[in-house]
Amino acid sequence: MNKIVTLRKTEKLNLKEEIYSSNEIASLKGRTTLISGAASGIGKAIAIRFAKAGSDLILVDINEKGLDEIKEVTLLYGNKVRALSSDLSGKDAVRDLWEKISSDAPDTIVNNAGIYPFKDYLEIDRNFYENTLEVNLNSVFWMCQNFIRKRGSRGGVIVNISSIEALIPFKEDMAHYCVSKAGVMALTRSLARDYGRKGFRVNCVLPGAIRTPGTESLVKKAITKMQLSLIRTGINFNSRLTLGRWGKPDEVAKVVLFVASDMASYVQGTMIPVDGGFLSC
Ligand code: NAD
């Protein structure tokens, strides 16, 4: 009897000790995270989530004005924040960025910057195709290489942002995009295999149907141009969202935070959809 009472007391104590806020559970205090595409949508939400979790930040984007705005917001959480404007398309641009970062290598990188322009497959020329690959895939390839070189034996965490379109090409005129995002998944798995034993965790998050300035401008375009095929695709797309709604950027950011934190210390080389159920049916 006495034993049970003692046990209950201890349990109570442990419970009390374990009541943390979500920011404490997934704390990134003392760490630095580089986030690309941080000026808008999902990247912006990730920047805010990571700032709340105590991470110092290196925010990167091609959009200088947007970068200044998110820098101001994230500084409010009391961490160090650097904003570096860069067009990440091109190996040299990525190398220049890492030279600016200098010896101060971040512990974590989130490769989120991306573009998703629509184009009929038969109309795609070399420039268009290469530009999509440069921004969505090649930049991630070179970012990871620079990161792993800089971190060396210290290891680190990489979270790459792919897309549900890499698995199910639902929308027409997106072959170039699907190729780029499938490449991000393949890269993630390869690096997880090659560098896991050297202290690197590498994972991929697959968003789908998230309301951001990027997706909203596409929806507006389809409606104002009365592009019937796009509107039809939109209706079919929505019918696969078993949660019955589009997601918010912060709903992706929370998952990225989890994957980047020590809560996910045994999560490696995986693809995590954040898509309201799209891939589940
Ligand atoms: P967004 O357009 O709102 O934001 C993208 C950001 O990337 C912008 O700030 C933009 O300036 C930056 N960027 C674009 N080209 C760049 C370049 N060359 N160099 C540096 N920065 C550049 O888009 P979003 O919807 O927030 O998407 C973010 C990521 O999530 C993208 O990789 C996208 O493919 C992926 N994604 C989004 C959805 C969704 O539903 N929103 C779905 C699947 C995948």
Image (cartoon, rainbow, N blue to C red):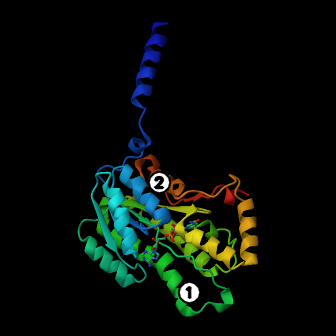
Residue at the spot x=66%, y=86% of the render?
A: 121
Residue at the spot x=34%, y=68% of the render?
A: 68
Q: Quadrant of residue 170?
A: bottom right
Q: Is residue 156 left or right of residue 227?
A: left
Number of other residues with Cα within 10 Å of mark 2, as a class: few under 14, some 14 to 19, many 20 or more: many
Label 1: state its secondary structure: helix
* Residue picked out by circle 2: 259
74 lies above or below 122 = above
- Kindly identify which numbered label has been placed on residue 251: none
Q: Quadrant of residue 97?
A: bottom left
Residue 186 coordinates in the image, percent (x, y): 54, 71
* Mark 2 Cβ inside 8 Å of ligand 1: no
Residue 265 coordinates in the image, percent (x, y): 44, 50
Which part of the image, by quadrant, shows the C terminus?
Answer: bottom right
Q: Distance between the residues labelled 1 and 2?
A: 31 Å
CB within 8 Å, label 1 to label 2: no
Q: Is residue 278 left or right of residue 203?
A: right
Residue 41 coordinates in the image, percent (x, y): 49, 64
Q: What residue type is labelled 2?
A: Val
- Kindly identify which numbered label has been placed on residue 129: 1
Label 2: state its secondary structure: helix
Q: Which amino acid does label 1 sit on?
A: Tyr
118 lies above or below 21 = below
Residue at the spot x=68%, y=59% of the render?
A: 278
Q: Is residue 104 left or right of residue 92?
A: left
Tag 2 or tag 1, which sits nearer the N-term? Answer: 1
Nearer to us in this view, 4 or 169: 169
Q: Quadrant of residue 36?
A: bottom left
Number of other residues with Cα within 10 Å of mark 1, as a class: few under 14, some 14 to 19, many 20 or more: some
Residue 170 seen in this snapshot = yes
